[in-house]
Amino acid sequence: MQLKKNKVFFDDVTAVSQWTEVQDESRLASGYQLKACVTLVGWFDLGRHCVTLMALVEWWIPRPSFTVEDHVCLLTSRSFETFQTRTSVCTHISALYTQSDNNRRTHDATSKAAYMAACQRKHEVLDRKKTEYWSERIQNEGSSPTRLWRSMSALLQRDKRTADVITPTNHDADAFLRYFDEKVRTVRAATDGRPAPAFTPATAESLSVLSPCSTDEVRQLIMQSPTKSCAIDPIPTFLLKELVDPLLPYVTAMINASLREGYLPAEQKRAVVTPLLKKPGLDADELRNYRPVSNLTFVSKLVERVVASRLVGYLNTHGLMPQLQSAYRRHHSTETALLKVLSDIYAAVDSQQVVLLGLLDLSAAFDCVDHEVLLRRLRVRFGICGAAHDWIASFLYGRSQRVLYRGRLSAEWQLLLGVPQGSVLGPILFLLYTAELFDVIAECGLTGHTYADDTQVYISTPATDHVDAMDRLATCIERIRDWMADNHLKLNEEKTQIIWLGTRQQLNKVTARALTLPNATVEFSTTVKDLGVVLDSQLTMADHIAALSRSCFFYIRQLRSIRKSLTTDAMKTLVYAFVSSRIDYCNSILAGVSGQLLQRLQSVQNAAARLVTGARRSDRMTPILRQLHWLPVRQRITFKTAVLVYKCRHGMAPPYLSAYCEPTSSRGGRCHLRSAESGQLTVPRTRTNYGDRSFAVHGPVVWNSLPADLRLLNISLPAFRKRLKMFLF
């Protein structure tokens, strides 16, 4: 497909894009839809060029008509690539087989040599072709481990089932649409008749106007956005980026008109919903195993990014964002959330206490947000009013969606509740909608931490008082359930997980086996999965490391079967996507675990290194890891911890983690010590190994062990990472 970029066409685009004196946002949005279609037709010279679509086939797909020797040359040069497929290389390979078979049947030395040469040429052809295909495939899909592994599984024929067996055959797009709507209606019916929630003002500040954006800001947002398109986009995103200069004034005027009027056109409130399995391995025939993910138009997300930057900036300036909510926020992650929760737990266990941890589950949380409740909360609690409030109201009301499943669209459905999960602004609005939940937890005397709709509630107590702690947790969960019902959300008490955490000696004093809630009796678990990490009662992390090792070795075995078809660089890409990324996920919480458990992870990394380099099991791994520039597992944990401390000291981490990194110079009476002058941090005192594993202790210890030149405040993060890695090697 060739693009026509002549001067006449660009002049036409520029002329139309200068239609910026129109003040009405609806006309601007409609004009964008029409102009985008005209642009699309003008951009492609459809009269001259014909597009040929080819289905993806295996690496042995027929290639152009060449001899085997010419085809080998073809594999090393893409310049001879063509779509002609009349003569297959398989024909040449078949002829080689015939020739080889004839030579093999004669027993003279000349025929034997010819047979071996023919076999060698045959294998060279196959090996070269496989290597080229796999390398190109990995390069194209390496940025998405999910798509990459799905393609590899299909090519390796790991799943022998047909597509009709893998995906449900008795459901269509309309069935998904009805199920998603019925699920929301069920939750809503269960909360009807509840009293209206009370709203408590949290600030005297207000946000009434959304400041206009400049062309430079819009250009930066466009170019930094992912090049993804929605099925209802009037123009592909890649083409919009190609035409960003002539279209920029028009798009900027359209966004500013939307901000000024507090209005979002209907064209930008339509969504295409894709049903996605909640977890891999779930039954694909069960509709309840799917969650709806909205795909919105690119321009809609562009406007949302502008609004989100103003809204988040206002909230952060006045400290209105929930401090213990770690989702959809800059410098926050699942790892920072777990570090905070585990630091609190380790501190309690270090004081000879036990901790009762509850993991709460919500049903269709994003889809059940009540628009009226949300808008009142934004106005009363967060001070959002005027045109800013009107714009958010316009964003919520009048939305519609269609489900796209197996290439077919369902009927259009009007949405009366919820915020779209696939949007930019929807998750932020959900965080504000549930912000008062922390007040409920604090009033019960417990500590809470959330990541989106995943809520963790915990309380520490002496083991002898565990019954009182259970009563307080039950009361807290009941109050959380009532608060959610008042706000038209539903808490699944049946899916709530509760676990006691502590030392073996203290846990033996806990005699209770279950917690009785108003609508369910929840038995205490011995292990729970919290934000992707498996926690056991004694916090040994043995179950987590065992599950992690099994997962990594599974992928190593799968990759080993195609190693000969891949270059070293391609294999490194795959190993990083499927093995190293799993080893590094939340690995800072593994600080202080037993050396025997870390050795299990080290054996995983060693196996991955041997897979990449082709080394033998008897070879020493230290030089091999150094050759690959891979830090060993223990050093990777130290590296991650040091980087997190660096971010805490430079304002690039959540406040709840930065509070653990207190410089010695800030302590009264210590500002004149040498440790204060060298940039060291204060290390709290501990009694047991559990206390040493807390980030509040382990982070400062790692930081103080670094050379003085690494602890300087004027060093950039890339330079710090580079020099830190050299130090740890």
Image (cartoon, rainbow, N blue to C red):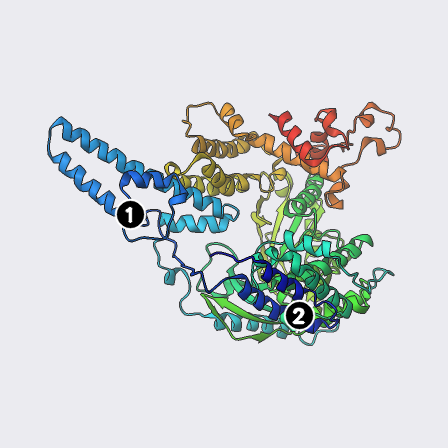
- Residue position marked by numbered label 2 in the rendering: 29
* Left or right: 678, with 40 as reference point: right
Tell me where residue 348 sits by quadrant: top right
Residue labelled with disc 1: 65
Secondary element under disc 2, as helix, strand or loop, is helix
| x 76%, y 39%: residue | 650
On the rendered structure, is 576 left or right of 267? left
Residue at 71% across / 24% down in the picture?
Answer: 707
Q: Nearer the viewer, mark 2 or mark 1?
A: 1
Identity, as a three-letter code, of the amino acid under mark 1:
Ser
- Check disc 2 and give the amino acid type: Ala
Task: Estimate the x, y position of residue 164 in percent, counting from the top left.
Answer: 37, 63
Q: Residues within 10 Å of mark 1 (few under 14, many from 20)?
A: some
Residue 594 has which mark? none
- Sequence-wise first label, 2 or 1: 2
Identify the residue at horizontal 47%, vertical 64% (top origin).
46
Mark 2 neighbour density, 10 Å: few (under 14) some (14–19) many (20 or more) = many
**Number of callouts in the render?**
2
Q: Residue 495 placed where, x, y %?
A: 57, 59
Q: Position of residue 302 (x, y in %)?
A: 66, 60
